[in-house]
Image: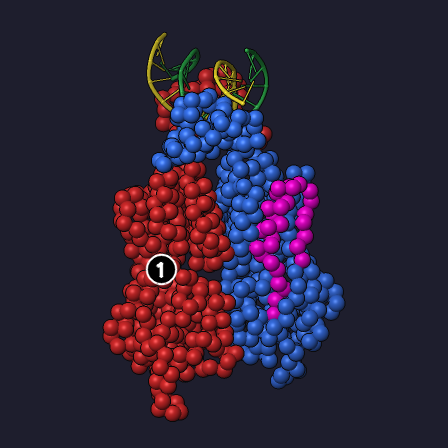
Chain colours: A blue, B red, C green, D yellow
Amino acid sequence: MSSGRATIHDVARIAAVSTATVSRVMSGGKPVSAEVADRVRAAAREVGYRPNPAAQTLLRGRSQTIGVVAPDLGNPYFAEILKGVAAEAAEGGHHTLVAGTDEDPDLEYRSAIELARWVDGLLLCAPRMSTPRLKEVAAASRSLVLINRVLRHPSIGAVVVDYQEGVRLLCEHLASLGHTRIVYLEGPPNAWSDRQRQRGFRAAEALGQTVVPVPCGSAMRDGYAAVDEALTHKPTALIAFNDHVALGVLTRLRELGVDVPGELSVAGIDDAPMSAHTNPGLTTFAVSTVELGRLAWQRFSSDPAAGATHLSGELVIRGSTGAAPRRRRSPATATKPQASSAR
Amino acid sequence: MSSGRATIHDVARIAAVSTATVSRVMSGGKPVSAEVADRVRAAAREVGYRPNPAAQTLLRGRSQTIGVVAPDLGNPYFAEILKGVAAEAAEGGHHTLVAGTDEDPDLEYRSAIELARWVDGLLLCAPRMSTPRLKEVAAASRSLVLINRVLRHPSIGAVVVDYQEGVRLLCEHLASLGHTRIVYLEGPPNAWSDRQRQRGFRAAEALGQTVVPVPCGSAMRDGYAAVDEALTHKPTALIAFNDHVALGVLTRLRELGVDVPGELSVAGIDDAPMSAHTNPGLTTFAVSTVELGRLAWQRFSSDPAAGATHLSGELVIRGSTGAAPRRRRSPATATKPQASSAR
DNA sequence: ATGAAAGCGCTAACAC
DNA sequence: GTGTTAGCGCTTTCAT
């Protein structure tokens, strides 16, 4: 009937049993006579009794709750990870506590430490936090799983997308189309997963492609804003840190009247929902973000610290990449002696 | 130093004081001599003491946590609401517990009831839950705020976007361009906010426009799939339940070779981040979703049940709407005697 | 200003 | 099978 304010004592009184018996009935699987059990359940229903989770947590030492910390909860990438995590966690009888950190490394740390006290395990998308602090967080939390970042540490697990492979696939694809001069629109400075991508480019350079990194970011507006500088490097292809950035790029290119892929091929990473809906469609390295969240939960619920789980993606070729254009105009290809290679 | 496993007793022992004194120091604002306070703080730091939140919750009866329930955490609309809520809540020293409900009304109910026991307040995006159940949730939770749904009830508050107004603005805009026959791509059946939109259309019909409702949904793929049926009604303009749907519509129209806005004007609702980046840009009724989340928190932290807070949006006109085409071909305008008016 | 003690709601020994 | 008791970690009277 009533709300959840009733305590175990109320139920015990009404059913004329001890609180221990009530507890036994509620948790189930305990030896209780059928008759008493019925009486208790009836009483519980009557007063709308639901056990106080704080009391249970205090006693058991576990809250049946996990924490998820991400730089931007509004970003579809993290939103989908969260969706996957929350769904699996609920399946496993766990609640999900979230914290957005506004891309602020300091807030990342403080949120994680704060949540750690509450939860049974922490899932961190913390691309920017320093390694020492990450270890502090590991020490403060019952178990810690990192997303898209690996750290050799006995109590830190990880689930990572193989972005190095992704970049390799993208570069190979572009190479097969004749592209040798590529601009890479970099992600947030110091982001672990950006470094993975950079490694992929290093491999591509070893195969003869030239990759010019241009500082950018992770949002659509960052891509939009970085296009003009990117073009000064006269690439025939451009790879963005992720699909959102690439979407911004396509918009700016359209404004500038640059033909895609005629004059410039564009590729993204992650395969955002919109990427199949642009014109032309965006070539990208597709990753199932919801699956990433799922894996993170599984990792947590099995052996949190057992190294890194790798999630691979696949190349999705759409209309935004095409054959490299022949050099237009003057053969002054290497006009300005700019840094011709990523450092 | 160490992790968060230390208890108040450890600190008390080290500082050679009672646990009561430790508590006084930690909570602050209590009369404690400076010397003792320092000793306690030093001891606390030494063992890395952080109070056990479950114990505090048990004692205080408040968990400093709010719950957010939404149909789809991966949907940018809800993701941004969550972002707004979580940010404000953190500001106010509260944690945020989330639950995604997979668009399932039953899960909506169970999640809400479940979370209610934990949290100090519940924010529900529950467009499909029945009113009686909603009232049950209200009874089970300390305080309840609904997003995009109002319900006359002494203990239920709400924050709603004025979608009726949005539809009105959109229809007026289209009317001024000469559109009299509009298809509306409906949202999820029984969704409260869809009914608000339908009201807006009723007003438009009173002013002489014909609005044909076509069942659709809330996702991009729904819009994509609904286009073919929509076209059978020969509209000159189409308004989608939201921008995501409209984005799917634009894709399908491009495939079909239908010129937008030449042959068909298209408008969305909500102003998703992508909507400024399509070609043509999407005309829409812009709403600040993050702001919506913020308002929800404010409502919770002030007077949760005091009626409804209204958030208004504004018309954003982009390239996807234009002058209505003159009737092509035969003057058999009303060829098939289809339902000429929304019921 | 500080300590002793009670108790928040629940569960797990331990009796019977 | 069921009741009694102790106590999870903390805050808060009530003494002193």
The image position of residue B316, as x and y in percent, is: 35, 69
- Which residue lies most toward the left here? B207
The image position of residue B65, as x and y in percent, is: 42, 39
Which contiguous range is marked in magenta? A283-312
Residue A13: in magenta span: no
Q: What residue is rendered at 43% in x and 47% in y?
A: B109
Would you say A55 lies left or right of A173 here?
left
Residue A290: in magenta span: yes
The image position of residue A106, as x and y in percent, is: 51, 44
The residue wearing badge 1 is B193
Circle 1: is it few (<14), some (14-19), or many (20+) Cα within 10 Å? Answer: many
Front residue of A244/B272: it is B272
Would you say B51 lies left or right of C6 here?
right
Task: Find residue A45 and report its image quarter.
Answer: top left
> Which quadrant: the N terminus of chain B?
top right
Q: What residue is rendered at 60% in x and 38% in y?
A: A143
Front residue of A209/A101: it is A101
Of all chains, the one bearing label 1 is: B
Q: Amino acid at mark 1?
A: Ser
Q: What residue is rendered at 42% in x and 25% in y?
A: A15
Task: Find residue B261 and report its image quarter.
Answer: bottom left
